[in-house]
Amino acid sequence: MIKESKAYQYAKWCIEEDNQYVGIYVKKQASSWINIVDGLDEEAYVDEKFYKKLCKLLKIINHPDLMCSMYEGMEDYAWFLIIAVFCTRLKGDGRRYYETALLEICRKNFKTFYSAVIFLIGMLTEPQFSRFFSVAPDFKLSNELRLALRKIVKASPALDKYFKINRDMISCKMTEIEYTPLAYSNDRMDGKLANIFLADEAGAMDDYPVEAMRSSQITLKNKLGIIISTQYPNDNNVMLDEIDHAKKVLDRIADNKRYFSLLYEPNIELVKEWENNDLVIYQSNPVSYNNPDIFQSIKDKREMAILYENKRENYLCKHNNIKYKGLGVEGYIEITKVKECRIEENLEFWRGKKVYCGLDLSQSDDNTSFAMTCEDDDFIYAKVWGFIPKDRIEHKSKKESVDYKKLIEEGACFECGDEVIDYSFVERFILNLENEYGVEIIQLGYDRYNAISTVKKLENEAIECVEIKQHSSVLHSPTKWLKELILQKQFKYESNRLLEINFQNARCTEDTNLNKYVNKKKSADKVDMVVSLINALYLLEQERLYGNGGFICQVI
């Protein structure tokens, strides 16, 4: 019977070889679940008896907007999500197989509405006295699920009498199950016991609310966490880690098979085609496939995003699930173009290379950055590091919405000093570069501000240091060159999320002679890594133009 369901039929449609309307990770999840339905999985099976019970419930739950039963009116992807979550069971004891359900989906795909359907089913079928919670950045967002649940209950006469709806809670009289919306901004998440929880708009929260809810479930055998969101432009959000983990599960890199995810985002090769490829819309908006009006509305928004950069961030994040950061001013380089130049770390590549380096020394309590670059086979290669004061990690992470602890673990930056940067650590790092990477430092470019003492120490160790005036007339050329290298895919940088964040933050200013340069004051946030990279490229560009390690006089 389950093979006749809309959930199974949708999953089969997803994995059709010529079907490009869904992305690769949706296909992988569909294929994995089909194996369970077909009896090919060692751990899980689909409970046909509970499926029949679920269908009966969906027939008495009314869709408040379509004026029909939920059984008739539910979207295909919602069928897949709900049936997979509730009917997939663990062999042996019959518990729900999936403990986490992740839904990455764009706006106007009814994600909160179907989350309410899941909660309603749970309140009617879970053990007596269970407790449900929704968590969101603020109470208004968290309350959206309560409002959606209330709307469905009120539209369903067969259910209305069994529910008690208050401002702060909804309870089911049959099962004595209570649902409470919580707000991250107001409520502590600890001390709860959540049989089922929903993290709504997870992209706007860090990992505390989700981890607090998961911690509350440790003693429960039958538990479920639902995490839903669109993409957000900030870099310190729990959704990024959840999506990364979900992809590892689907790629069979991680072992947590009890993690169900529907990642409606465009395939990586389509991201750069967002301006003209309709598949980007279809892969991130499953409802648009069967709803021409929604599809056309998104296309209209796309046209506005193409014309006006200040509309691009909202469109790409909320309607394409493409992470993009822009503040309505002239950005430097679109981050999707930058990411196409990313390569994996390769220490052996650098051995024997002649490198030009760039240094951006900050004020003592702020970020510092160092970059090295070289040319090889007509490509420009770069590796960049950041340095931050150890005791300011928490403060800076909250202020800048950047998870510096994780970036330190990834090797993108180093903690040094206490409240202020330990410049001696930076100096030792630079002096050890030739031994560590087997490179030969030809020149090091620096901004004079805050750098005089460090430069003297480096020069004493036979490193040739070149002052680079931080002026548009000097910086315009390497700034322009870096952009051209990236757009022409002649630039390669070793994987570095902090560098990508800096590129997202970077904003350009134009002087009266139309010279452009990255302006620290007008950028969205920290750009020190981009600045140190441009300093390094300035020297490399001079070498290409004039040779012999020479450089032209800087006339201001």
Image (spheres, rainbow, N blue to C red):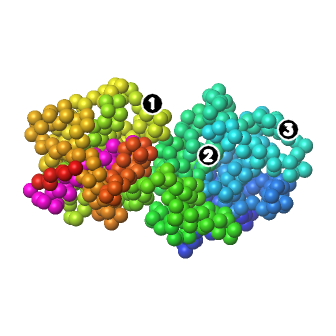
Reply yes or no: does residue 206 show up in magenta: no
The overriding secondary structure of the stretch rendered in magenta is helix
How far apart marks 3 and 2 lie (CA) works out to: 26 Å
Residue 498 in the image, given as x and y percentages of width and height: 38, 45
Q: Which residue is mark 2?
A: 201
Residue 544 drawn in magenta: yes
Residue depicted at x 75% and y 42%: 146
Where disc 1 sits, the SS reads helix
Decide which of 166, 101 is in the foreground and name it.
Answer: 166
Image coordinates for residue 194, horizontal then vertical, percent: 68, 35
Residue 373 seen in this snapshot: no
- Report if residue 20 is visible in the image: yes
Residue stretch in magenta: 526-548
Q: Amino acid at mark 1?
A: His
- The circle on residue 395 is 1
Rendered position, 368 above or below 313: above
